[in-house]
Image: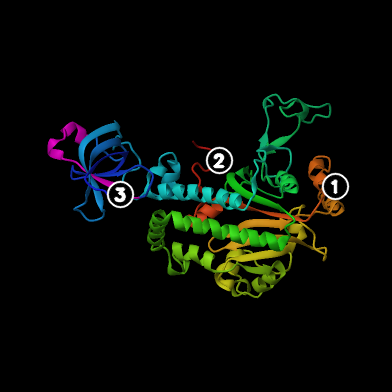
């Protein structure tokens, strides 16, 4: 209707009341767009009882004539001939009244916060980005693979996994040695929720050439920060015959595609979120405000080639940087081998290079066992993509395709070969160079929407001590 060029036609609209002014003007929204349609009620000929029930949050159906609006702010309006209340909303109790609410308050009402402009915009953008992910890979001939959510493998080797069991926790069966007897559990072994579909994805890439996964992953990491969730969605492509350079090319092309897709298809929502961000930043000290608006930041990623820098070069830059020398960093960089923190990553992107950065060739001892060892014996063919405001958004690597090297790395880390026999089989039978990466979907949504807390870009956030809804 908002895009219609035909006026004076009879239309029907159903939605939720955002505001009702002067007993006459209803701002109606059906969730399909951030824009409301104004519905003009003939209050003199509408029963008083009905007018009282037109409250914020009420679900209504209006039938009337679509006409050019005489008022400012909208091109069209509906001149209401018939109005039906589909569902009442008590204004004394409905929490989403048309006023400014804190993000914390909205998180506590996650089941209703999507009725606000901000969260309606965020969730529509999330949906469009999700479609763009599939669109990109499908157009390039990738096969979509659903890797298991329940697994016996710890892909990251970090051990921060949620255990899955059907054993009675108040009466656990024990072995003769006094350990928990997992043979009596549902799967007959110790199982967890997946932290990554990568290992299973690799086995499919070694048969189908190029695959991607896109599904929920879980980390039992007790991190109560604005960048961590216990349950989040991961995009993980794996490509046979790709080396690290091809992997970096794929990741850069993919990110630019999905951001452009959002810019092309979410203009109204992005414009609204940009204005929201500008308003929010007014309360911050000048030094903490973004140098770019939201749309400038998104276009910045599209218009700038990602700078590729080795870990070793990055350490030299950070060690000689002013915040490091003046001890402004929380984590001071003294020597090669340090695990980079978000503050270091953001310095490289926002202050030093002033463009997205891909760091590669990390020290082997701070990266996972499956990453390919370089000829120097101390670095691996890993890469991370760093973004302004976010830090790391992508982590990936060329995988270790050499059976003997992989076995040695697993032994050094105490990883059981028997548990991962199936993963090792891909190196026994027709092994080849292959690479992949993981992109946390919520971090992408965070970047595109300009939000600052990852809990605000997923419908129902799961965090330590919080599994509400």
Q: Residue at x 30, y 35 (%)?
A: 89
Considering depth in this image, is 432 or 371 the residue closer to the camera? 432
Quick check: marks 2 and 3 in contact, CB under 8 Å? no
- Across and down, in percent, residue 464 comes to 57, 43
**Residues drawn in magenta:** 35-52
Q: Colour mode?
A: rainbow
The Cα atoms of the two marked residues, 1 and 2, are separated by 44 Å
Verify whether residue 285 appears in magenta.
no
Q: Which residue is under mark 2?
A: 465
Residue 392, placed above or below residue 148: below
Residue 105, placed above or below residue 257: above
Q: Mark 1 or 2 closer to N-term?
A: 1
Mark seen at residue 4: 3
Quick check: marks 1 and 2 in contact, CB under 8 Å? no
Q: Mark 2 or 3 closer to N-term?
A: 3
- Specify the farthest residue to the left: 44
């Amino acid at each position: 209707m908002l895009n219609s060029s035909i006026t004076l036609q009879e239309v029907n609209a159903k939605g939720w009341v955002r505001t009702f002014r002067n007993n006459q003007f209803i701002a109606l929204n059906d969730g399909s767009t951030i824009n409301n349609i104004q519905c003009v009620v003939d209050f003199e000929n509408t029963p008083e009882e009905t007018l009282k029930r037109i409250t914020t949050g009420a679900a209504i159906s209006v039938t009337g004539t679509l006409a050019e609006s005489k008022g400012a702010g909208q091109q069209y309006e509906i001149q209401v001939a018939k109005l039906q209340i589909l569902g009442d909303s008590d204004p004394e109790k409905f929490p989403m009244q048309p006023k400014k609410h804190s993000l914390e308050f909205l998180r506590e009402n996650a089941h209703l916060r999507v009725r606000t402009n901000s969260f309606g915009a965020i969730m529509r953008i999330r949906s469009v980005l999700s479609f763009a992910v599939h669109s990109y890979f499908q157009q390039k001939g990738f096969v979509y693979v659903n890797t298991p959510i329940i697994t016996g493998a710890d892909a990251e080797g970090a051990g921060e996994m949620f255990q899955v069991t059907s054993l009675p926790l108040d009466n656990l069966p024990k072995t003769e040695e006094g350990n928990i007897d997992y043979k009596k559990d549902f799967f007959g072994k110790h199982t967890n929720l997946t932290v990554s579909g990568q290992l299973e994805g690799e086995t499919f890439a070694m048969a189908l050439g190029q695959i991607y996964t896109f599904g929920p992953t879980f980390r039992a990491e007790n991190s109560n920060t604005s960048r961590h969730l216990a349950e989040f969605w991961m995009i993980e492509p794996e490509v046979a015959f790709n080396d690290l350079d091809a992997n970096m090319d794929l990741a850069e092309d993919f990110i630019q595609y999905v951001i452009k897709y959002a810019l092309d298809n979410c203009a109204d929502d992005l414009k609204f979120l940009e204005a929201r961000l500008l308003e929010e930043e007014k309360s911050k000290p000048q030094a903490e405000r973004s140098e770019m608006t939201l749309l400038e930041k998104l276009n910045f990623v599209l218009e700038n080639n990602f700078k590729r820098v080795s870990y070793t070069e990055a350490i030299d830059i950070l060690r000689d940087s002013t915040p490091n020398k003046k001890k402004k960093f929380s984590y001071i960089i003294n020597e090669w081998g340090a695990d980079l923190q978000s503050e270091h990553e953001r310095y490289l992107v926002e202050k030093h290079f002033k463009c997205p950065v891909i760091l590669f060739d990390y020290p082997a001892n701070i990266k996972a066992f499956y990453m390919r060892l370089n000829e120097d014996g101390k670095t691996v063919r890993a890469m991370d993509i760093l973004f302004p405001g976010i830090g790391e958004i992508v982590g990936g690597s060329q995988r270790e395709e050499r059976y003997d090297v992989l076995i040695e790395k697993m032994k050094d880390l105490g990883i059981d070969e028997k548990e991962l026999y199936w993963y090792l089989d891909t190196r026994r039978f027709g092994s080849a160079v292959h690479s992949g990466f993981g992109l946390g979907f919520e971090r992408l949504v965070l970047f595109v929407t300009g939000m600052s807390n990852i809990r605000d870009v997923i419908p129902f956030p799961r965090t330590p001590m919080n599994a509400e809804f």
